[in-house]
Image (cartoon, helix red, strand yellow):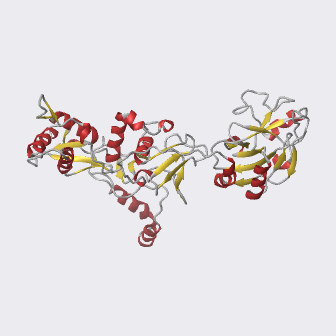
């Protein structure tokens, strides 16, 4: 038997099939025991059936396995003409290359099954093969295999799918701009609906299984069918929770993860999130009249990162708060603000502030001479650039940066106007040297 010319390709993998059946004859057909056209030719000399592997191994080949005329009509009307086969059971196989498809799609409503879009870990019986009932898989449209997008496919097959309502995991009382997190996720491209790319935690086989709706403030993972708001995105990106586990109520069931997420949201992403006074006991004792200084300070330090810097030049130690990737001065003012929030519904006494402030000044004390971050690290807007590994690393409070260069590190960026100035002003041998001089200005000193 022969494989039709339009189906012959070194980009497509083929499967050995049990004769008289529709299933593969080898166990590892999805991974190792699939073959190129050259490799399958010898097998075809004595076979009457072969399979075509779908998915990434076959250049993202998808086959719409159509069982109903209504679906076939919709495909013929809504998608480009392509290589098409009538199956042995009088259905149709429509062949398409879909580079951004993520997985197999079942085409079924509550009332009826219409077919499947076969993709990764799936195979279909190839054209000119014999069906177990004796019928031949016939080529009905001998066209070149067309290329379409997953969105084009989705639009056409929408009436033949059961639409699953997405349940986004959200947190009441938090109105946070999700763009503050999304802008730090590499590889997200702008689309008409927001941002789209690979899931930042587990990646994607095609680079398009994750989207962020900036207008609604939500994100969604197509692989696990999970989604949430900005806080859940922080937890996802920081690997505090697995993507598949992000379901409504997760934070309520995992308060420690919630606290970690809040802290990182404040410090790394710059969210102004007030702490909740009902989480910490303000007073202790039999009559609840003793200020719980230690408990309050411990809670503040759980949610915020401070460092107290002392030196010989000042009478009072300086308190710095870690926010948005670096330690900021006037941490004492931030602490006072936090204390006021805690005592929002309690008659205020300056004694509360003084006691708590004095206690905090004894925590995380660092000598000024010890706060220098490593010289090979440059703190920029979207992370810390490592001059030894040439990689951009996430911001980290363990490095005592007291500044942040307000620009993004962009590897592919060019500087045509600066280069034009250098080349028109300097001798050629001084152009590289001038760039190095300006580069050294970024070093901490």
Q: Horizontally, is 217 left or right of 203 in the view? A: left
Closer-to-camera residue (360/443): 360
Image point (29%, 45%), residue name: 373
Kindly indicate the quadrant of the structure image that contains residue 419: bottom left
Q: Is residue 40 visible?
A: yes
- The single residue placed furthest to the front in the displayed view is 111
- The single residue placed furthest to the bottom in the displayed view is 424
Q: Is residue 240 visible?
A: no
Q: Residue 279, how many percent across, how many down? A: 26, 37
Closer-to-camera residue (336/388): 336
Number of marks in the image? 0
Q: Split into 4 quadrants, where in the image is the N terminus?
A: top right
Q: Horizontally, is 48 left or right of 29 in the view? A: right
Closer-to-camera residue (365/119): 119
Image point (42%, 71%), residue name: 421
In the picture shown, does residue 404 fall above or below 11?
below
Closer-to-camera residue (425/427): 425
In the picture shown, does residue 86 fall above or below 252?
below
Image point (69%, 33%), residue name: 31
Q: Residue 97, how many percent across, how many down? A: 71, 50
Q: Residue 307, how many percent across, how many down? A: 22, 42
Q: Horizontally, is 350 left or right of 16 in the view? A: left
Image point (44%, 73%), residue name: 424
Q: Residue 243, how many percent across, how many down? A: 49, 39
């Amino acid at each position: 038997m022969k494989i039709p010319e339009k189906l012959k390709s070194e980009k497509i993998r083929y499967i050995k099939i049990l004769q008289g059946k529709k299933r593969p004859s080898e166990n590892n057909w999805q991974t190792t025991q699939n073959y190129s056209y050259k490799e399958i030719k010898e097998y075809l000399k004595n076979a009457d059936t072969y399979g075509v592997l779908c998915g990434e191994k076959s250049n993202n080949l998808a086959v719409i396995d159509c069982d109903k005329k209504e679906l076939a009509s919709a495909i013929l009307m809504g998608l480009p003409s392509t290589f098409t086969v009538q199956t042995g059971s009088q259905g149709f196989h429509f062949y398409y290359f879909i580079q951004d498809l993520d997985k197999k799609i079942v085409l079924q409503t509550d009332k009826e099954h219409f077919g499947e879009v076969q993709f990764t870990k799936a195979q279909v019986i190839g054209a000119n093969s014999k069906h177990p009932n004796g019928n031949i898989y016939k080529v009905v449209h001998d066209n070149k295999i067309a290329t379409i997008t997953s969105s084009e496919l989705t639009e056409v097959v929408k009436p033949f799918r059961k639409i699953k309502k997405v349940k986004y995991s959200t947190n009441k009382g938090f109105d946070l701009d999700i763009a503050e997190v999304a802008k730090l996720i590499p590889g997200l491209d702008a689309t008409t609906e927001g941002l789209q790319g690979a899931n930042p935690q587990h990646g994607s086989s095609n680079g398009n299984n994750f989207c962020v709706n900036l207008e609604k403030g939500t994100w969604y993972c197509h692989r696990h069918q999970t989604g949430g708001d900005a806080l859940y995105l922080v937890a996802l990106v920081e690997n505090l929770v697995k993507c598949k586990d992000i379901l409504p109520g997760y934070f309520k069931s995992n308060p420690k993860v919630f606290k970690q997420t809040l802290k990182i949201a404040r410090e790394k992403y710059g969210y102004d999130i007030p702490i909740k006074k009902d989480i910490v006991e303000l007073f202790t004792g039999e009559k609840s009249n003793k200020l719980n200084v230690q408990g309050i300070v411990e809670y503040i330090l759980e949610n915020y990162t401070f460092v107290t810097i002392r030196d010989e030049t000042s009478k009072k130690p300086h308190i710095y708060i870690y926010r948005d990737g670096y330690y900021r001065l006037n941490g004492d003012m931030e602490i006072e603000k936090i204390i006021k929030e805690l005592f929002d519904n309690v008659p205020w006494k300056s004694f509360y502030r003084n006691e708590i402030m004095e206690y905090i000044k004894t925590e995380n004390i660092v000598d000024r001479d010890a706060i220098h971050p490593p010289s090979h690290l440059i703190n920029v807007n979207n992370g810390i650039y490592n001059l030894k590994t040439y990689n951009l690393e996430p911001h980290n409070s363990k490095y005592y940066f007291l500044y942040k260069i307000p620009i993004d590190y962009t590897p592919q960026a060019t500087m045509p106007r600066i280069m034009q100035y250098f080349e028109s002003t300097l001798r050629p041998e001084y152009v590289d040297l001038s760039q190095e001089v300006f580069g050294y200005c970024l070093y901490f000193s």
